[in-house]
Amino acid sequence: MPRVLIVDDEPSILYLFKEFFKLKDFEVDTADNGLEALKKLHNNKYHLMILDVKMGEKHGLEVLEDIIDRGYDFPIIMCTAFGHLKQDVDIIAGDKMDVDFITKPLDLEELWSKTVSLLKSHAIKTDNKLGSST
């Protein structure tokens, strides 16, 4: 069963995403700030992260930088009301991470489409890495 970590400081968004991914047969963990998310990453393995950009305690872009610095390898969907941040994320992530965006207000069909697409492309990329190392 795939496992997702949802990170957002809005309780209603956490609840909505948690219930949505449970219906899609995901194991779901949540964090209401970036520091809590990094602690959960240290103790668990995830297949996907849904990460809000604008949070109080630790900004989503800072969390993304920490994830890359620590060498984690899973796709991330960033949630933002600010479409112009895509360029910043592209600069931070480069080709090190599979990152996509969903803008607020949220569209669950778009979220699911991006989830499926990212998980498939990440699986192909991971298989290619394994194949080239043998």
Image: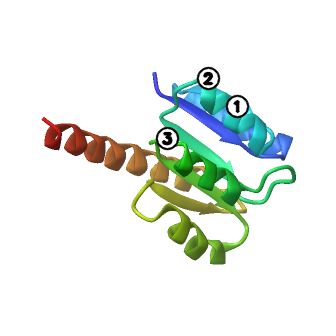
Of 9 and 74, nearer the camera is 74
Answer few, some or many: residues within 10 Å of disc 2's Cα (few below 14, many 20 plus, some between 14 and 19): few
Find disc 3 in the rendering and name its residue.
72
Of 84 and 102, nearer the camera is 84
Answer few, some or many: residues within 10 Å of disc 1's Cα (few below 14, many 20 plus, some between 14 and 19): few
Along the polypeptide, which appears first: circle 2 or circle 3? Answer: 2
How far apart marks 2 and 3 lie (CA) works out to 12 Å
Q: Amino acid at mark 3?
A: Tyr
Mark 1 touching mark 2, by CB under 8 A?
yes
Q: Position of residue 134 (x, y in %)?
A: 12, 35
Q: Give the secondary structure at mark 1.
A: helix
61 is higher (above) or lower (below) than 127: below
Determine the image quadrant of residue 61: bottom right
Q: Residue furthest front?
A: 69
Q: Position of residue 85 (x, y in %)?
A: 64, 72
How far apart marks 1 and 2 lie (CA) works out to 7 Å
Answer few, some or many: residues within 10 Å of disc 3's Cα (few below 14, many 20 plus, some between 14 and 19): some
Mark 2 touching mark 3, by CB under 8 A?
no
Q: Give the secondary structure at mark 2.
A: helix
- Tell me what residue is drawn at x 52 percent, y 71 percent: 91
Q: Give the secondary structure at mark 3.
A: loop
Of 104 and 125, nearer the camera is 125
How far apart marks 3 and 1 lie (CA) works out to 13 Å
- Tell me what residue is drawn at x 85 percent, y 40 percent: 11
Q: Position of residue 122 (x, y in %)?
A: 35, 46
In the picture, the disc for residue 25 is: none
In the picture, the disc for residue 39 is: 1
Q: Amino acid at mark 1?
A: Lys
